[in-house]
Amino acid sequence: MAYWLQCIECSRKYEKRDIVYTCPHCNGLFEVKYDLDEVSKIIAGHEEFKRRNQGIWSYREILPIEKETNPISLQEGGTPLYHCKKLGNELGIKKLYVKHEGMNPSGSFKDRGISVGVTKAIALNFDAVACASTGNTSASLAMYSAYAGIKCFVLLPEGAVAIGKVSQAMIHGAEIIKIKGNFDFALELVKSLTTDPEKGIYLLNSVNPFRLEGQKTIGFEIFEQLGEVPDNIVVPTGNAGNISAIWKGIKEFKYLGFIEKIPRMISIQSKGASPIVRAIKNNYEKIQPILAPETIATAIRIGNPVNAPKALRAIKESNGIALAVYDEEIIQAQKDLARLEGIGVEPASAASIAGVKNLFKNGQIDKDEKTVCIATGHVLKDPDEIVAVCKEPMKLFEDEESLRAFVEKRLSSF
Ligand code: AN7
């Protein structure tokens, strides 16, 4: 299928084989464009995608990879969508759903984008890739690079990446580079390392427009699993790639005539790292970066989101919302989801639930609306946080009698 790159600011077009991450003319972000009229001649309806049942690769005609190329796939996508009845009842919203992206191969939604990104790297003859990361991108990139047999460099902000994620990067054999400074600084460094494609390192942060194409499939799956478009899609937002990607996919499905309605795109950030929320609230054209972002949700501890221009458009075009939540609310939502629904997620993911709770309270979400929260990463990503927030003491029992007494007491109070 024909596709090319187009700058979202100046609309200049580039060839799909051009190795450019941002527009050489105006530094704007790129978007992948397809000849959708051609696609609609080949794909009769969305059911055809669904029938293939191949995760993200079901959508090949609207992914930027040639037909002949073998995907580097570890069976990403096809994640469960749970109807959270108990939690929904507690919040007052009956139609609350969670799309559990923690069920991807490396335990986060990043696998969708990295599968496409590493496939692209191989197709372009790169034998090394790199990213800066708050953790999940590095885990995913390390995993897919190992499978593809290419070299992988990950730049991690020192002391700010959850241990589950670092250990994944380690076991899959990535070159781990600790950076003195936060994620935003690590991203600047990795961009400069990869500006010269002749050096042979392909950049796979979400500024890479091909990567985002894989992530748009989250929206397609929600539509298929739900049988309709929900009223709201709620996305924890850091570098703002995911919310932009999902929105792009929705617009493509609409153009293709597969859907009529569009959802509101709702961005949730943590209070200590909420440049998108501030920009929407104050009606800024551009975000103002936050210099020292801070939150327990380390995945989204990002002050200068590279995809902000796309995310701001997604929120505005969809008549969406941006809201910041406190760390305490994130922790509560993480516990509620785990204890009422049996769904274990990392703090960043729980931000979406915390956001919905507040939006319902202040009347921005109605009780009858269908709302899908994206649970972006698995609970085992950040075990230190769990131990810190679950303070129930672990008792040491020396004899059977006191153990029995304890268990009986607990059973009778259950
Ligand atoms: C669990 O891994 O940026 O708004 O370097 O790991 O698309 O950036 C992770 C981001 C939400 C935010 N939830 O997504 C990285 C990284 C989890 C995440 C986000 C991330 P974007």
Image (cartoon, rainbow, N blue to C red):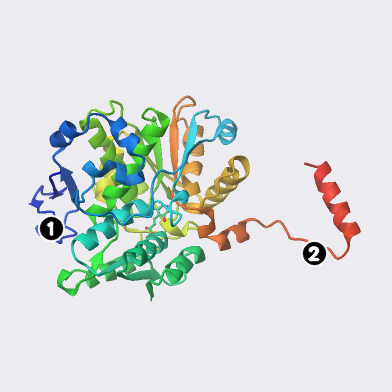
Give the residue type that dot 1 points to. Answer: Arg
Q: Position of residue 44 (x, y in %)?
A: 22, 29
Query: Looking at the rendering, which quadrant does residue 388 occupy?
Result: bottom right
Tell me the quadrant of ligand 1.
bottom left
Query: Residue at left 36%, top 59%?
Result: 303
Image quarter of the N terminus: top left
- Residue at disc 1, secondary structure: loop
- Residue, disc 2: 396
Location of residue 300 (image quadrant): bottom left
Q: Look at the image and tell me whether residue 282 can be seen.
A: no
Element carrying mark 2:
loop
Q: Residue at x 32, y 57 (%)?
A: 114
Residue position marked by numbered label 1 in the rendering: 17
Residue at 18% across / 34% down in the picture? 42
In the shown orientation, is residue 87 left or right of residue 395? left
Is 197 above or below relative to 409?
A: below
Hey, which residue is sitting farthest right in the picture?
401
Give the mark nearer the N terminus: 2 vs 1.
Answer: 1
Q: Label 2 sits on what residue type?
A: Leu
User: Can I make out residue 322 in this image?
Assistant: yes
Q: Is residue 357 above or below residue 151?
A: above
Q: CA separation, marks 2 and 1? A: 62 Å
Viewer-nearest of discs 2 and 1:
1
Residue 200 spot, x, y in % from top left: 20, 72
Snapshot quadrant of residue 252: top left
* Horizontal side, residue 412 vs residue 12: left or right: right
Query: Which numbered marker is on residue 332?
Result: none
The x, y position of residue 108, in whole percent, is 43, 53
